[in-house]
Amino acid sequence: MDRIKQRMNQLRLEADESAAKVEELQAKVKALEQENLAKEQEISSLSHKNGLLESENEKLDNNVRELKKAASDGEQHGTQNETLQRRLQLLEEEAEEADKNLREINEKLRQTDVKAGHFERKVQALESERDQWESKYEEMSKKYQDLQKELEDLQVEIGNI
């Protein structure tokens, strides 16, 4: 019986040890479950944070694309601006050249007007002189015809004598 008692004691000790170990393991399981729950909450929190960061990253990518496009547009506008400035400079030079030509043409026109006025006076003087010559010619022609008639009359008279 001693052996049975000893065995019972030993089994009780083993049962106590097993119960203690079960309690220890249950505590460990409980701790691990709490740790697992905490990790799941952390994972959930990090997943949410990850989602927010991905949406923020997407917004930033869109912003970068827009800024790159704006920079490209800015370069194009800069190039267009330079082209327009060169064109404006050429047009200003052409306008100055045209203005210079216009002044020269106006001066030539003024000189031509002066010459035209001079020639008009000459034409008037020549027309007046021509009119005088025509009237002299008509007078002379009339005198010539009169003299011609007198000569014919004289020849007729001389022929009759």
Image (spheres, rainbow, N blue to C red):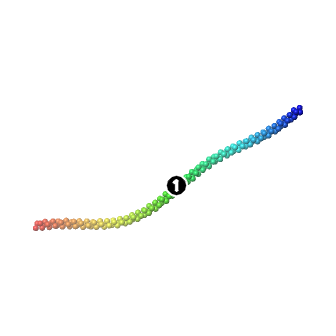
Q: Position of residue 116 (x, y in %)?
A: 35, 65
Residue 110 place in picture, x, y as percent: 39, 65
Q: What residue does disc 1 label?
A: 80
Image height of 113 relative to 17, above or below: below
Q: What's the residue type where badge 1 is placed?
A: Gln
Residue 137 at what x, y percent from top left?
A: 24, 66
At 52% from the left and 57% from the top, the residue drawn is 82
Q: Quick check: 83 left or right of 38? A: left
Furthest residue in direction right, as rendered: 2
In this rendered view, identify the residue nearer to me: 142 or 81. 81
Residue reaching furthest to the front: 3
The image quarter containing residue 153 is bottom left
Quadrant location of the N terminus?
top right
Which quarter of the picture shows residue 107? bottom left
Q: How many labels, in total?
A: 1
Q: Nearer the viewer, residue 118 or 105?
A: 105
Query: Is residue 29 depicted above or below 142 in this figure?
Result: above
10 Å crowding of disc 1: few (<14), some (14-19), many (20+): few
Of residues 148 and 52, the one nearer the viewer is: 52
Residue at image location 74% in from the left, 40% down from the top: 33
Q: Which quarter of the rendering shows the C terminus?
A: bottom left
Could you say whether the residue bearing mark 1 is in a helix, strand or loop?
Answer: helix
Q: Residue furthest left?
A: 161
